[in-house]
Amino acid sequence: MQSWRRRKSLWLILSASWLLLVLLGGFSLLRLALPSRPRPGAPQGWPRWLDAELLQSFSQAGELPEDAASPQAPHGGSCNWGACFDTSKCRGDGLKVFVYPASGPISETHHRILASIEGSRFHTFSPAGACLLLLLSLDAQTGECSSMPLQWNRGRNHLVLRLHPAPCPKTFQLGQAMVAEASPTVDSFRPGFDVALPFLPEAHPLRGGAPGQLQQHSPQPGITLLALEEERGGWRTADTGSSACPWDARCEQDPGPGQTQRGETLPNATFCLISGHRPEAASRFLQALQAGCIPVLLSPRWELPFSEVIDWTKAAIVADERLPLQVLAALQEMSPARVLALRQQTQFLWDAYFSSVEKVIHTTLEVIQDRIFGTSAHPSLLWNSPPGALLALSTFSTSPQDFPFYHLQQGSRPEGRFSALIWVGPPGQPPLKLIQAVAGSQHCAQILVLWSNERPLPSSWPETAMPLTVIDGHRKVSDRFFPYSTIRTDAILSLDARSSLSTSEVDFAFVVWQSFPERMVGFLTSSHFWDEAHGGWGYTAERTNEFSMVLTTAAFYHRYYHTLFTHSLPKALRTLADEAPTCVDVLMNFLVAAVTKLPPIKVPYGKQRQEAAPLASGGPGPRSKPQAAAPDCVNQIAAAFGHMPLLSSRLRLDPVLFKDPVSVQRKKYRSLEKP
């Protein structure tokens, strides 16, 4: 009897062990594959499975014909970055791009591409001084194809731009030219040399672009969670909880409830299943990204856009279409925190790199510039965290902790000193009292006087405990935002010579800025609004609780915004600020708001001084009488940005015990008590 029990126990143990091994192996097999970051080398096909070795052990010979297919030879042969690109031409002014004139009629999208390049800091009109020569590959829609330019030089230092997966037939050999192509196949794509672009629709905007459409971060009960891209257009919705494999024709289960929606409108779904076999499916990828619908790519055969720098594991999922039920089960079991993180990343990537033609083209050029400078390139954090690499210029720094918007992620804080930059414009006088008030601040490290006046410099300046430097300006208002090398601190206190501040006001405003280093902290405010009567944006300098801008006549901000203002903004906008000085405050506030997606912060300012404060830099009138140029420049700047980035706020920060009935000796900022 005992022998029988022992045999039974042994049999149960062996059965349980065998079952456990099967479950563990099956669980590994069912894991979703995520796209890995590409590395230079031999081309390999999607998907790049995390469980490739395990998958091979469970498959029989001949079961994976699509994976076993021999790849086609990539265009350009063994061409790579080191062998086919001469970086010596880029050592002087960095990446400068010359665009060949089109040899025939071009589409509206090509017009947008030319405008985005010509308005960028990369463009040059001289092919001899260019580091990169760009050739637009005209597609079949125009009826003509590109011809070989005279300076072709076997394609060396050339970039052929193809906006559609099916371009014109090749009329010449690419040779050593790079290719920036929409949704290239993995068999022809050369990692580390070519650039994968998104599939842009014909109506994609030049700049700005529509914002992300994600409104509900967490799915609500009863809302469809799955959208399936269909071959004939439109989306079919289904529930991830069903036992269906909706994209697999061999599936015998009941497909469950579903709904077909034609057109370009994407239903409110959490996951968007996109087939990887058809090139036109790539156009659905951007649509899902904008909607905040997590793209689930079913064994895609095209390279994901900008995969060299974008970590798509944070925003998309690559799944095996041969395991439909397991894919659905994995999506259903994904934690809400993971779903939310993926959806938030889709919105960031859409806004930073894909919402307009200008952003797509500038991202392409930024990727190539990163290759040129190597160690000076953007680290992965700058590419994959807000505000993105296009707004974190590597010419300023390659360390995330040097930028104002990465202090929280880096666990660092801005330094505890600031530089006062006092602009003296016509018909200004030496700001002697202002210098003394600023010099009294315990946080002031240096005072710089930007003299943009026709009058000669005064013979003497007030004696201060910190260095005082006089900079000779070029009589332009935009000189105030030039990245002067003499500025040694992160924080800048921008002042107008006619401004009037107390030392306590300066100290408190700086303490506030240290908690919000990515924002502007100012004393005087203004607001924008939509004017229905005129069909445009309006501007008011009236004192209200709500505001969207602070005047740079007295404001704290990070010195990085000087670099961004000078090297990132189009020259036309800086010229506008010089010609209409009242626009300079609006332009700087637009820039900071576009980067941070946040409003500025207001701090208290003396009432008597506020009544007499000027409207803006160069504005001689009182604050209560705004100049007529302000509304016009708001609309011009909004048109140049492609959208309205300004956000309204009612937040004003005051010091603790300010105007409370306690002893004045207990107050840290005593002078703020005075009217």
Image: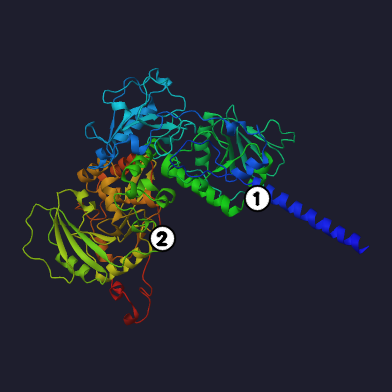
The amino acid type of the residue labelled 1 equals Glu
Q: Nearer the viewer, residue 221 or 249?
A: 249
Question: Are the residues flagged by discs 1 and 2 in contact, CB closer than 8 Å?
Answer: no
Q: Is residue 222 left or right of residue 275?
A: right
Colouring style: rainbow
Looking at the image, can residue 349 be seen?
yes
Reading the image, the residue beneath label 2 is: 410
Q: Which of 557 and 277 is in front in this view?
A: 277
Looking at the image, is mark 1 or mark 2 earlier in the sequence? 1
Residue 666 higher or lower than 161, as above or below: below
Instruction: Residue 665 in the image: state x and y as whole percent.
Output: 31, 82
The residue under the point 46% across, 24% down is: 166
Q: Which of 237 and 392 is in front in this view?
A: 392
Quarter of the image for residue 371 reads top left
Q: What's the mark number on residue 544? A: none
The residue under the point 35% across, 30% down is: 177
Reading the image, the residue beneath label 1 is: 333
The amino acid type of the residue labelled 2 equals Gln
Quarter in which the C terminus is drawn:
bottom left
Q: Is mark 2 on a helix, strand or loop?
A: helix
Q: Is mark 1 on a helix, strand or loop?
A: helix
Q: Residue furthest right?
A: 1
